[in-house]
Image (cartoon, grey):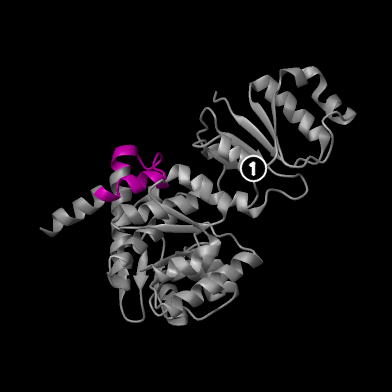
Amino acid sequence: MAKLNIVLYEPEIPQNTGNIARLCACTGASLYLVGKLGFSLSSKYTKRAGLDYWDSVDLHKIDTMEELFEANKGANFYYLTTKTKRLYTNIKFQDGDFIVFGPETRGLPSIYVQDKNALTIPSVAGLRIGAGFVELASHENALKAVSYQAPEVVLATLSKISNIIINSTVLLIGCGLSISKETENIFQNTIELAIEMNLPTVIDADGLNILSKTPILLPKNTILTPHPKEAARLLNCELKDILNNMQQSAQKISKKYNCVTVLKSHKTIVCDNEKIYINSTGNSALAKAGSGDVLAGMISGLLAQKMNIFDSAVLGVYLHGLAGDLAKNDLSAYGVLASDTIRYIPLAIKNYLDRQV
């Protein structure tokens, strides 16, 4: 069993902390208490819940999460939250991993529960498909985690978005964004800058969800990459309406938003207001969390190389499916993760180019 580190961020209830301390003592896990506590460690309630196990606990009191990140560079941090579809049972924990719990009544702040893989994966996928330079703007806490996972990606805080866009050739927005008043404002302001700079734009994940709530004018060369549920939100209809007619749904999105639509499924559809393409590559291994982030990064990487938006979407979808097929052949459909698909992008490109000769 992996030796883990348990982090309680600003815990509020002494009995819960005491119970967790007992569990840590019995399993050999280290316990980190971070930030302002809602009780005293000398409280009779805390001591009673921990019984006589406190002396056996590897206990650390840390002032901030930033201090914890800095002291444990390279470690994996997993955040327990209801705001995710990822199950803890799907993670293969390793020695030294950190599992972070938030306050009982509030949960973890959004800057911590933001999916770091949703930031890392599209960035690396863009580089793998040939983009020469990828710059990622996000919350500072998220950037620290990403810097350990993807050192090739240039990082910037959200306050630098306008400077980034001025020097960019393509914008990808939405992956790992989350939905809040703050991120809605960030989304709208960034899209306005993209329009001003005439920047090809790919909108994915929570960017699509924000767009469905607050329709705004989009840049002239925009690609939307919804899965069926996101498509239903964009069209304000039921999921069954999308599933019963995927092709027509994709065309409706393109018409409504004047964009290229990539409607993801087992046979992903790419269309604009004139053309339509139905993809032939891919398999069930791609029906995993993060796979859509890989695709968004690949399409953006092709756009960065001055390919037109429809061809970027078509080729990105094709190569994404082909990388998934190659990964499945080596690892099986059950074992392929989104990060595995990224590693097969160069082989997929080589395979594709060999077929063109």
Residue 248, relative to residue 177: is it above or below? below
Determine which quarter of the picture holds residue 97: top right
Q: Is residue 7 magenta?
A: no
The amino acid at mark 1 is: Met
- Quarter where residue 42 is shown: top right
Residue 317 appears in the rendering: yes
Q: Is residue 70 above or below residue 293?
A: above
- Residue highlighted by disc 1: 65
Q: Main secondary structure of the magenta part?
A: helix
Residue 131, position as x, y percentages in the image: 31, 59
Q: Residue furthest right?
A: 44
Quadrant (top left, top right, bottom left, bottom right) of the C terminus: bottom left
Q: Is residue 85 visible?
A: no
Q: Position of residue 301 (x, y in %)?
A: 33, 61
- Identify which residue, 84 or 50, lies in the foreground: 50
Q: Quadrant of the N terminus?
A: top right
- Residue at figure coordinates x 30%, y 55% from the top left: 129
Within 10 Å of disc 1 (Cα), the crowding (few <14, some 14-19, many 20+) is some
Out of 126 and 285, give the one closest to the viewer: 126
Q: Position of residue 309 (x, y in %)?
A: 32, 72
Check if residue 345 falls in the magenta segment. Answer: yes
Q: Name which residue lies at 65% across and 26% down.
A: 30
Q: Viewed as shown, does residue 168 lie left or right of 9?
A: left
* Residue 249 position in % (x across, y down): 45, 74
- State the SS at label 1: helix
Please provide the residue range marked out in magenta: 328-346
